[in-house]
């Protein structure tokens, strides 16, 4: 079994997070490995639509990033995704 890691990212809106979670569920469901993603924290900045999400997963960071790339308008998630301990919320333009 793979090690569990905690990742954190920011999204422009809740819809982006929902689309990511749907896409990652499809990846996990078709896997022969025990793979999962669990949301451990979700903060929405009202009145703004930004969301900050923390997840626990046994998927590698690169695989999570590859799923985020498939989300239409998911660029903020991709650019802010970090290990929880390294998260700053700052975007790195990749």
Image (tube, rainbow, N blue to C red):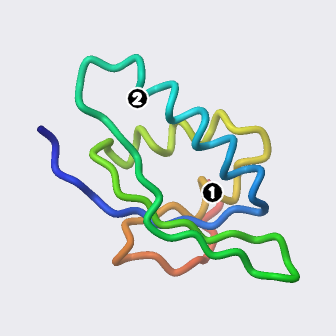
For image coordinates 38% across by 76% down, the residue present is 86
Image quadrant where residue 28 sits: top left
Residue at the disc numbered 2? 28
User: Mark 2 packing: few (<14 Cα in 10 Å), some, or many (20+)?
Assistant: some
Taking depth in this image into account, of 19 and 75 the one nearest to the observer is 19
Q: As displayed, is residue 77 above or below residue 66?
A: below
Image quadrant where residue 11 sits: bottom right
Q: Label 1, label 2: how many angstroms apart (C-alpha)?
A: 19 Å
For image coordinates 79% across by 46% down, the residue present is 73
Return the x and y of residue 59 as percentages of the image width and height: 32, 42
Does residue 84 appear to the left or right of 93 in the view shown? left
Front of the two marks 1 and 2: 2
Taking depth in this image into account, of 61 and 22 the one nearest to the observer is 22
Image disc number at residue 51: none
For image coordinates 62% across by 43% down, the residue present is 20
Q: Quadrant of the N terminus?
A: top left
Q: Secondary structure at mark 1?
A: helix
Residue at the disc numbered 1? 77
Q: As displayed, is residue 58 above or below residue 30?
A: below
Return the x and y of residue 69 as percentages of the image width and height: 62, 39
Mark 1–mark 2 CB contact (< 8 Å): no
Name of the residue lying farthest toward the right:
47
């Amino acid at each position: 079994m793979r090690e569990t890691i905690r990742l954190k990212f920011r999204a422009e809106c809740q819809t982006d997070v929902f689309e990511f979670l749907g896409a990652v569920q499809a990846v996990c469901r078709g896997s022969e490995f025990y793979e999962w993603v669990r949301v451990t924290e979700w903060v929405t900045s009202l009145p703004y639509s930004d969301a900050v999400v923390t997840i626990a997963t046994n998927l590698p960071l690169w695989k999570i990033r590859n799923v985020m790339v498939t989300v239409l308008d998911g660029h903020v998630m991709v650019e802010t995704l970090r290990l929880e301990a390294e998260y700053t919320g700052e975007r790195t333009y990749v």
